[in-house]
C-alpha cells in the first residue's frame, strides 16, 4: 500500500483525537472482521474476551465502563455500528478504512 501525503493528512484528521483504548478497540474490531466461522455474528467483536483475563471485579468494572464510553464515541464518529446481538459491534466501511490505515501490516482474508 502506497501512502501519500494526502493519505497521511486524512489519517491524522481521523485519528487525531483517538485514545489508546479506542485504537485498541479498532484493532480488536479489525481482528473480529477477519473471523468468519463459529462466531455469533460473522465480522463482529465483543469486549468479553478482553475482560475475561481480569480477576478483580472492581478493575474489570472500571475497564468495562471505559470500553463502553470508547465504543459509544467510536459509534458517534461513524467508525463502529451495533450488530444484531447485545454486546457485539462491527466496523463500518469508514471504520475499516481507518483501522487498516492504523494497522498497515494487518492482512484481510481474501
Image: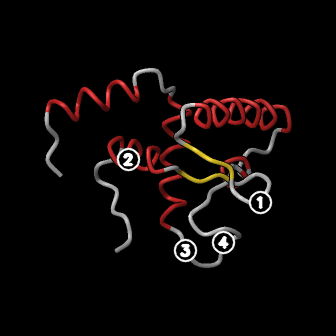
Which residue corresponds to mark 1?
85
| Residue displayed at 40% across by 28% down | 15
Between 21 and 51, the residue placed more toward the observer is: 21
Q: Residues within 10 Å of mark 3 (few under 14, many from 20)?
A: few
Task: Of the two numbered discs 4 and 2 on the same chain, state the one appearing first in sequence.
Answer: 4
Image position of 93 (left or right of 69): left
Q: Secondary structure at mark 1?
A: loop
Label 2: which residue? 97
Residues under numbered marks 3 and 4 in contact, where contact means CB atoms less than 8 Å apart: yes
Residue 37: horizontal and vertical position, in percent?
A: 59, 78
Q: Which of the two marks, 2 or 3, is nearer to us in this view?
A: 2
- At x 65% / y 52%, what residue is drawn? 89
The residues bearing labels 2 and 3 have C-alpha atoms spaced at a distance of: 19 Å
Q: CA distance from mark 4 to mark 2?
A: 23 Å
Q: Residues within 10 Å of mark 1 (few under 14, many from 20)?
A: few
- What x and y, as percent, mark residue 13? 35, 24
Q: Residue 5 vs residue 87: left or right?
A: left
Q: Give above or below for 100 relative to 67.
A: below
User: CA gap, disc 1 to disc 3?
Assistant: 16 Å
Q: Could you tell me which residue is drawn at 39 percent across and 41 percent down?
A: 98
Of the two numbered discs 1 and 2 on the same chain, state the one appearing first in sequence: 1
Q: Which residue is mark 4?
A: 39
List x then y, in percent, for residue 63.
72, 34
User: What is the residue that sits farthest to the bottom in this orientation?
Assistant: 37
Residue 36 has which mark? 3
Kindly state the secondary structure of the residue where label 4 is placed: loop
Which element is circle 3 on? loop
**Residue drawn 65% across and 78% down?**
38
Amino acid at each position: 500500500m502506497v501512502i501519500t501525503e494526502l493519505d497521511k493528512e486524512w489519517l491524522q484528521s481521523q485519528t487525531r483525537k483517538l485514545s489508546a483504548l479506542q485504537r485498541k478497540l479498532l484493532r480488536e474490531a479489525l481482528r473480529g472482521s477477519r473471523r468468519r466461522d463459529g462466531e455469533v455474528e460473522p465480522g463482529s467483536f465483543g469486549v468479553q474476551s478482553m475482560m475475561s483475563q481480569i480477576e478483580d471485579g472492581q478493575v474489570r468494572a472500571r475497564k468495562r465502563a471505559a470500553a463502553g464510553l470508547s465504543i459509544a464515541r467510536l459509534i458517534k464518529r461513524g467508525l463502529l455500528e451495533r450488530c444484531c446481538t447485545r454486546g457485539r459491534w462491527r466496523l463500518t466501511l469508514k471504520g475499516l478504512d481507518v483501522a487498516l490505515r492504523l494497522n498497515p501490516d494487518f492482512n484481510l482474508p481474501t
